[in-house]
């Protein structure tokens, strides 16, 4: 009888300690996923900064001209245990209102500069909630 009570007490203690250890790792997993999504957006930002301007504004651009958008499902990274973190990246580009042909003229834009905003928005789910993050790069030529 005493052995059964001791085993039951040890089982309850073990389950309590297991629950406490899981409570400690949950916030770490959230932080890890935030870091992974930030890293992916850094990749998006660097792509918009380094690609030649002609490629960014061309017909085959990853960032189509607004109102069009390009949506891609991507694997952002993997959690411990090889669990993938999936997200949706939406890309678009906006012309500056002072660009020639977009409302600007030789008086307001005498140098004929083109200015574009390239925006990447990532959507992902975590813990039953949906999160959005975005990065915008301004390029001119």
Image (tube, rainbow, N blue to C red):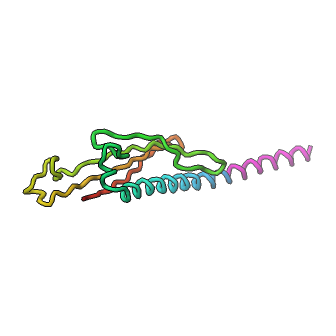
Which residue is painted at 13% across and 48% down in the image?
103
Q: Nearer the viewer, residue 25 or 47?
A: 47
Q: Is residue 69 above or below residue 26?
A: above
Q: Nearer the viewer, residue 18 or 79?
A: 79
Check residue 70 for magenta coloring: no
x, y (%) of residue 74?
49, 44
Q: 83 left or right of 91?
A: right
Residue furthest out toward the left: 107
Residues in magenta, as a range = 1-20
Which residue is painted at 26% across and 48% down in the image?
94
Q: 51 left or right of 36?
A: left
Count of residue discs: 0
Which residue is painted at 16% across and 53% down in the image?
98
x, y (%) of residue 15?
74, 47
Check residue 14 for magenta coloring: yes
Q: 38 left or right of 109?
A: right
Q: Would you say the magenta stretch is mainly helix, strand or loop?
A: helix
Q: Is residue 137 above or below residue 91?
A: below
Q: Quadrant of the C terminus?
A: bottom left
Q: Quadrant of the N terminus?
A: top right
Which residue is painted at 68% across and 49% down in the image?
19
x, y (%) of residue 101?
15, 47
x, y (%) of residue 133?
41, 50
Q: Nearer the viewer, residue 72 or 54?
A: 54
């Amino acid at each position: 009888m005493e052995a059964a009570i001791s085993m039951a007490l040890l089982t309850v203690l073990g389950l309590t300690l297991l629950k406490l250890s899981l409570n400690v790792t949950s916030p770490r997993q959230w932080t890890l996923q935030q870091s992974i999504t930030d890293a992916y957006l850094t990749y998006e930002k660097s792509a918009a900064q380094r690609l030649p301007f002609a490629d960014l504004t061309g017909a085959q651009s990853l960032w189509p001209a607004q109102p069009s958008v390009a949506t891609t499902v991507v694997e952002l990274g993997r959690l411990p245990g090889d669990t993938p973190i999936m997200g949706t990246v939406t890309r678009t580009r906006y012309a500056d209102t002072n660009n020639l042909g977009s409302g600007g003229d030789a008086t307001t834009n005498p140098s004929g500069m083109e200015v574009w905003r390239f925006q990447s928005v990532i959507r992902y789910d975590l813990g039953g909630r949906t999160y959005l993050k975005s990065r915008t790069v301004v390029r001119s030529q």
